[in-house]
Image (cartoon, rainbow, N blue to C red):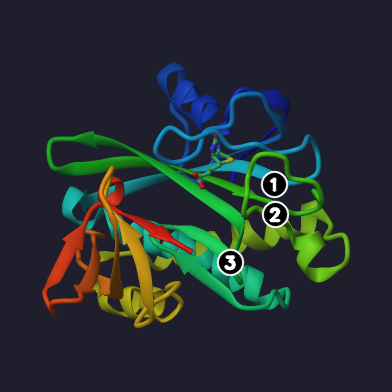
Amino acid sequence: MQRIKLSATESTNDYLKELMTLKRVSDFTVVIADTQTKGRGQVSATWESEPSKNLTFSVLKRHEALYLDNHFLLSMCVSCAVYEVLLSLGLPRLRVKWPNDILSGTSKICGILIENSIAGQEIKTSVIGIGLNVNQILFSNQGKASSLKLLLGREVPLDDLLQNLLDTLQRYLNDFNVSTWHSILSQYENILFKKNTPATFQEPNGPLFNGIIKGITKEGKLRLALEDDRIKEYGLKEIKLHY
Ligand code: BTN
């Protein structure tokens, strides 16, 4: 596992992607930064993280014959790996909010941004970006953000935590193949935030409505039971959960 430690960069995902255009980067190369000046989140959001307080890193995963249809398998593996490490630290009420935010109660402590490079129908490489709020205690513009320190009441050493995350991620990614689909799906659905619980949702610019999360499709869509008993499937930008 090659590690590249930077004091500052715009985004570790972007750094790793840029590096791949310049040279052959080996599987499981990790880029970690004390500071990101343009950290990116999902759906063109930004990712704010106080310098040297948190973990912001990206891991390159190369794939042999991973078809686009199975992209969500990787996403679930990463969420389950991070969940396992955080659970071992004793964080209360841990859940994964679809598709891959890690919550403790209703507070977001970790975000995951996976960017794939695709050739034909195959995913060739994935840059797995992880932002974990560790020792930061003040959050300005992220309404529901929290950190391990706020939730556990103690500082958590960054180096040990990073090693634990990388070891666990590597174990999940080594075992990762399409035959493990069902076991990962059930592991993921077991820790899914608001599963089987009535909740409020909104389609883009639409009214609020009630529904119940029933699970995930193979393509990674959210399966919602609506009030008229229909099941409807939603992709990432098609639905927002209010909580
Ligand atoms: C999200 O919840 O919206 C995803 C946040 C992902 C943040 C991480 S921090 C390391 C990597 N580099 C980035 O620019 N983003 C990801």
Name the amino acid, label 1: Leu
Earlier along the polypeptide chain: callout 1 or callout 3?
1
Label 2 Cα crowd, 10 Å radius (few <14 / some 14-19 / many 20+): some
Quarter of the image for residue 37 reads top right
Q: Residue 150 at what x, y percent from top left?
A: 80, 62
What residue is shown with label 1?
55
- Vertical position of residue 214 compared to residue 175: above or below: below
Mark number, residue 150: none
Name the amino acid, label 3: Thr
Mark number, residue 106: 3
Residues under numbered marks 2 and 3 in contact, where contact means CB atoms less than 8 Å apart: no
Name the amino acid, label 2: Leu
Residues under numbered marks 1 and 3 in contact, where contact means CB atoms less than 8 Å apart: no
- Most extreme residue toward the front is 207
Q: Secondary structure at mark 1?
A: strand
Q: Nearer the viewer, residue 35 or 168?
A: 35
Residue at position x 13%, y 77% from top? 228
Q: Residue 55 at what x, y percent from top left?
A: 69, 46
Q: Nearer the viewer, mark 2 or mark 3?
A: 3
**On the rendering, which quadrant does ligand 1 occupy?**
top right
- Vertical position of residue 98 compared to residue 66: above or below: below
Earlier along the polypeptide chain: callout 2 or callout 3?
3
Q: Secondary structure at mark 2?
A: helix
What residue is shown with label 2?
162
3D distance between C-alphas at marks 2 and 3: 24 Å
